[in-house]
Image (cartoon, helix red, strand yellow):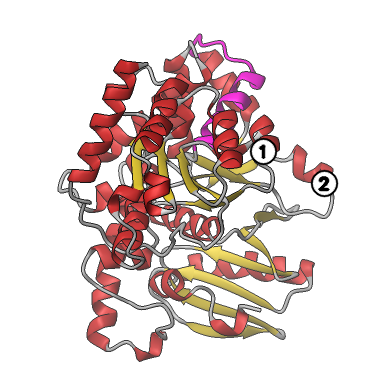
Amino acid sequence: MPDKFLLIERMIEEYWNGQLPEMFERELTPISKSDHIRDIIGPRRSGKTYLMFLTIRKLVEEHKVPKEATIYLNLENRRLSPVDVEHLDAVLELINSRQLIRKYGQVHLFLDEIQRLSGWERFIRSIYDDFKGRLRIYISGSSSKLLGGETATLLTGRHLTVQVFPLDFREFLRFKGLEVKDGTKADALSDARTAEIKGHVREYLLYGGFPEVVQSSQKDDVLSQLFTDIVHRDVVARASIRNSPVLDEFAQFLASIAGGLLSFHKMSKYLKSRNIKVSVPTLIRYFTLMKEAFLFFDNPLFSYNIRAQNQNPRKVYCIDNGFARMMSQGPDEDWGKLIENLVAVQFLRQGIPSYYWRASDQKEVDLILRYHRRLLPIQVCYDLSRADTREREFSSLLSCMTQLKLKDGWIINMDTEGTQRHDGKRVILLPLWKFLLFGLGQRYSK
């Protein structure tokens, strides 16, 4: 324990004496007036650590909290390996030996990547109960199961969750030096500003919004390493998977079909044809683990029949467009699928439940939203200038609207804007850039 105390003391003093990194403002902040534990979850390197440092900066600069009344510790730091509860005991010993709570009245404790520590739940519960109001606790993790199972029971009523995604388009533009303030209306933008915004859409569509990727000149190299890190550090290592090459291939396959239907039975047969025996339950387990690591998510078929939802394939999406584009197996970018993936992620970050729709004649609508007790059907495509594309997209959307008795539908595309009416139904054509910044439009938000 003495050695661990000295290590912790050295690391915290380095933090106190160091400079906080330069940072851009994000749309979310975990600061609140509540004494609840603040837990920050999301994919690896999506901005959880950044959000902690942003919170620290706000505490120090805006709330005039002395920096010594804040403590930050990254539990993935190699100097702590193997990390255990004694390291956190050493943190408490330092707080007590320096009389930080007595001196400042309240201490803010930031523990990054808490899932690296076995048994952290009971420790956090204990110090929360012992120091309530005097020790504010912030934790982060790269798994949606961070607060599942026993943890959820232990911390019930004691925590507030902030979920962090890669940059949305408004944040992406801010990283590029282009500010579009929340509340700005599309028609208030000048032609020059609109052209500048539209010029950034393609990069966002192709490379996604991981902050490190946005700021890098070697974007694909960073994306490749990040994809590998998520698979191996947040899936393979956490679940102790032995057959990691199969999981690697499965992960790459899932990213390559983003926006497509996933059949575990077909995937199992395909692998079997290559003399790789993997059962359907194993593939389902792998997929569940990758969803928990925020790498993928999926949408079911829209149906009022729950059994039909469960029996039909699910559409799979990737948390970031950079992964989907990089793993694509075709010779060129599939722009339609990339736009669909981006739109699906946008609704995920807003917490809006979404599905896909398919008729008996195989006509399909990409997304059906359940939004304020309404159903909103949305088609997604790249280019509406071709007559055959236009006919296909409108035909499927109008069939869906007729069957579900809906009056409004949307087609999100790269450039075309306008409204068309068909037999009392209204179809809104919405450019991607405008959707990413302003959603489906204010008049449809309620």
* Circle 2 residue: 306
Query: Quick check: can you spot residue 310?
Result: yes
SS at badge 2: helix
From the image, which quarter does the N terminus lie in?
top left
Q: Residues within 10 Å of mark 2 (few under 14, many from 20)?
A: few
Magenta stretch bounds: 274-293
Q: Nearer the viewer, residue 8 or 244?
A: 8
User: Horizontal and vertical percent for residue 270?
Assistant: 54, 21
Asked if the residue at tag 2 contacts the one at tag 1, i.e. Cβ–Cβ closer than 8 Å, the answer is no
Q: Nearer the viewer, residue 79 or 161?
A: 79
Name the image quarter holding residue 376: bottom right
Q: Residue at x 25, y 62 (%)?
A: 175
* Total count of labels: 2
On residue 152, the disc is 1
Q: Residues within 10 Å of mark 1 (few under 14, many from 20)?
A: some
> What is the three-letter code of the residue carrying label 1?
Ala
SS at badge 1: helix
In primary-sequence order, the first of circles 1 and 2 is 1
On residue 195, the disc is none
Queried whether the magenta region covers residue 228, the answer comes back as: no
User: In the figure, is residue 13 to the left or right of 27?
Assistant: left
* 253 shown above or below 204: above
Queried whether the magenta region covers residue 288, the answer comes back as: yes
Q: Label 1 to label 2, Cα distance in Å?
A: 27 Å
Q: Residue at x 71, y 71 (%)?
A: 372
Q: Which mark is in front, 1 or 2?
A: 1
User: Horizontal and vertical percent for residue 279?
Assistant: 63, 16
User: In the figure, is residue 444 to the left or right of 246?
Assistant: right
From the image, which quarter does the C terminus lie in?
bottom right
Q: Main secondary structure of the magenta part?
A: helix
* 2 shown above or below 431: above
User: Horizontal and vertical percent for residue 334?
Assistant: 39, 51
